[in-house]
Image: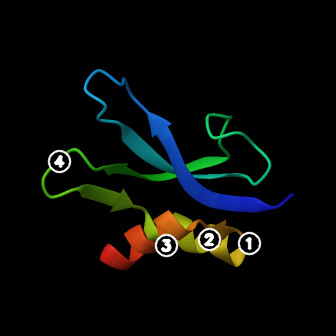
Amino acid sequence: MEVRIRLQKVGKSANKHYNYRVVAISKKAARQAMHLEILGHYDPSKKPAVVSINKEKLDQWIRRGARMSDTVRSLVKKI
């Protein structure tokens, strides 16, 4: 099973302000499918945007062969 580290949309769309989870999930799974593990969260509606990622868990998944999406990769660089 190929694993990706990507964003998963959570929360309500009342004002089109979504929160996102950074999750490890199967590559073939839909965006809202059950994740393998939550690695952090991202809230772009705050100024400045809040990014919180557990680096230990992230590194653990990368060592297992998981690949980050382009968006998550850019968020990790900001930390």
**Marks 3 and 1, the one that precedes in the sequence:** 1
CA gap between label 1 and label 2 equals 6 Å
**Marks 4 and 1, the one that precedes in the sequence:** 4
Residue on which disc 4 sits: 46
Give percent across and percent down for residue 65. Answer: 75, 73
**Marks 2 and 3, the one that precedes in the sequence:** 2
At x 75% / y 43%, what residue is drawn? Answer: 29
At x 54% / y 64%, what residue is drawn? Answer: 57
Residue on which disc 2 sits: 60
CA gap between label 3 and label 1 equals 17 Å
**Residue 8 showing in the rendered view:** yes
CA gap between label 4 and label 1 equals 33 Å
Mark 1 neighbour class, 10 Å CA radius: few under 14, some 14 to 19, many 20 or more: few
**Marks 4 and 2, the one that precedes in the sequence:** 4
Q: Amino acid at mark 4?
A: Lys
Give percent across and percent down for residue 70. Answer: 54, 69
Closer to the camera: disc 2 or disc 3? 3
- The quarter in which the N terminus is drawn is bottom right
Helix, strand, or loop for circle 2?
helix
- The quarter in which the C terminus is drawn is bottom left
Helix, strand, or loop for circle 1?
loop
Mark 3 neighbour class, 10 Å CA radius: few under 14, some 14 to 19, many 20 or more: few
Closer to the camera: disc 4 or disc 2? 4
Q: Amino acid at mark 1?
A: Arg
Helix, strand, or loop for circle 4?
loop
Q: Amino acid at mark 2?
A: Gln
Residue on which disc 3 sits: 73
Closer to the camera: disc 3 or disc 1? 3
Residue on which disc 1 sits: 64
